[in-house]
Amino acid sequence: MVHSFIEDLSTPDKFVVTLELVPGREFSGAATDTIKKISKDAYDDGRITAVSITDNPGGNPALSPDALGREILDYGLDVIVHFTCRDTNRVGMESRALQLARLGMKNVLALTGDYSGNGYRGRGTPVFDFDSVVLTAMLNDLNQRLVERGVSPIFFTGCAVSPFKYTEAESWMQYRKLQRKFEAGASFVITQLGYDIDKYQELLLFNQKNAINKPVLASLYLLGKGPAKAMFNKRVPGVYVSDKLLRQIESEYEVKGRGAKMAIERTARLGAALKGIGYKGIHIGGIHKSFDTVAAILDRMKELEHNWQDCLEEFREQPAGRYYLYPAANGNTTVKAEDDTSSGMGESALYLFMRTAHDLFFDKSASFAPMYRKISGTLDANNASWMLKSFLEDPFKKLVLSCQECGDCGIQHVGFICPESGCPKHSRNGACGGSRDGFCEVNTEKKCVWVRAYQRMKRYNETDQLAAEFVPPRLWELKGTSSWINFHLDRDHQKEEKAA
Ligand code: SF4
């Protein structure tokens, strides 16, 4: 192997370049041959540390990155496998992790994943038994298991983050979740794609201010007219392409041959700027035909990198009314913070009511807690839990929370909004990267539940409690039982939190 991803990331002066490759829907044929050819050429070129292979991108079926990755590893090029939470439950995920270990695939990019797309005869079930934080923790625990057996850990797990969020709530949630990912065991991070140098800088500053010393790779993309339009039109979750950039790209394509040339130039200029501001490396996507394009980008970057400051300004848009975490640091004055009115009076009143009820009935350190425990125990011992559930819990929670009777309530982690009925990905550890302007990636007409939670809590200066610590996954064995009784009898996921 010419390069090892782990070694290159830990080599102080090494600027790491990785490629993202997207398998097709057939197990063989032109798409697969092209990926293998690009990988082979990347290996021969010597400047690429690893290729990363996507996992059913867009939620649609594609050749497994595990199978393709193993073949590429056999050439001697290192591989990063994308691992999403969308398609299998925790049993399947653990099994896949064991398979990866057996295949010698160490580098994993742990992702919650896009929502389900179309498979055989229609849309697949969106599983999301875990979110990316829990998946990272699972891989870390598998490593610990090996260490306890006297074997070296296998998995080198990374995570994703999108700094390209332009509301305070979304921005804040992304960084908060990033901290949870690192605590869960992530060793590196790859950004989402965007064309805003101030946001790229924001992420580095956040890490610096929070003493996070993990390597960060910035995503780049060979942005042609088609993908730019799709990204601008929100068809690629979490990616940001501005109106100004789209118009510029469209005008470049009006001159024959100029569009493709400018796509290479833009990628190289952004790459040089990102190297200059301190990124550990770049992760290049959008390469579908040949490695020659990557070589051209890297050659041009080399020419540009001594004057990288000259490349900054073209990626600085400062769109009006958009939120930046450190406005003073980058000279950006167009900050739009959430204010007390972001959340309506109804939302606020509901939050206050739910929080008070929670403190009264679901605080194990409260003086009434032993009594609730006793009542719960008596109902449970007499097979009478159903009475509490049917006549009190279900009517109330269905009306107020659209409760789905999971029996392992997670509302307290999401500002008293239900992560089962409210979030299509059932995320309990923070928002996914797909929201746009505060709205959900999946239900685009609804606000992301994490944005709602943030806005509710901001009014009471309680946002610090959001995604403040690791939340274990829900316990499926409790489905259909009383979450109130499960809480008081220490049966739900919070017993694990207590034990941890
Ligand atoms: S509600 Fe938020 S976290 Fe859940 S899927 Fe939608 S955007 Fe993602």
Image (cartoon, rainbow, N blue to C red):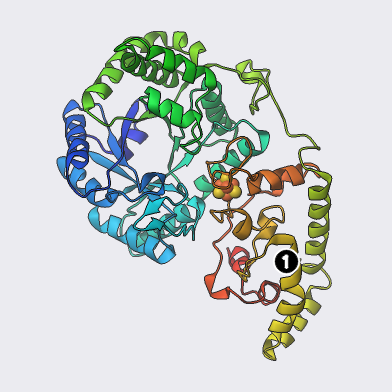
Residue drawn at point x = 52 percent, y = 28 percent: 204
- For the point 69% across and 76% down, the residue is 485
Q: In the rendered view, would you say 499 is above or below 52?
A: below
Q: Nearer the viewer, residue 350 or 494?
A: 350
Binning the other alpha carbons within 10 Å of mark 1 as few (below 14), some (14 to 19) or many (20 upward) gives some
Residue 254 in view in this figure: yes
Q: Identify which amino acid the numbered label 1 is placed on.
A: Lys
Q: Quadrant of residue 175?
A: top right
Choose between 190 and 210: the one closer to the eye.
190
Q: Which residue is mark 1?
A: 397
- Residue occupying image coordinates x 70% and y 49%: 465
Residue at the farthest bottom position? 382
Residue 444 in percent (x, y) is at 59, 43
Q: Quadrant of residue 259?
A: top left
Q: On screen, 175 above or below 326?
A: below
Mark 1 within 8 Å of ligand 1, using the beta carbon: no
Return the residue found at the far front: 121
x then y, percent, for residue 160 = 46, 40
The kind of secondary structure element at disc 1 is helix
Quadrant of the snapshot with the N terminus? top left
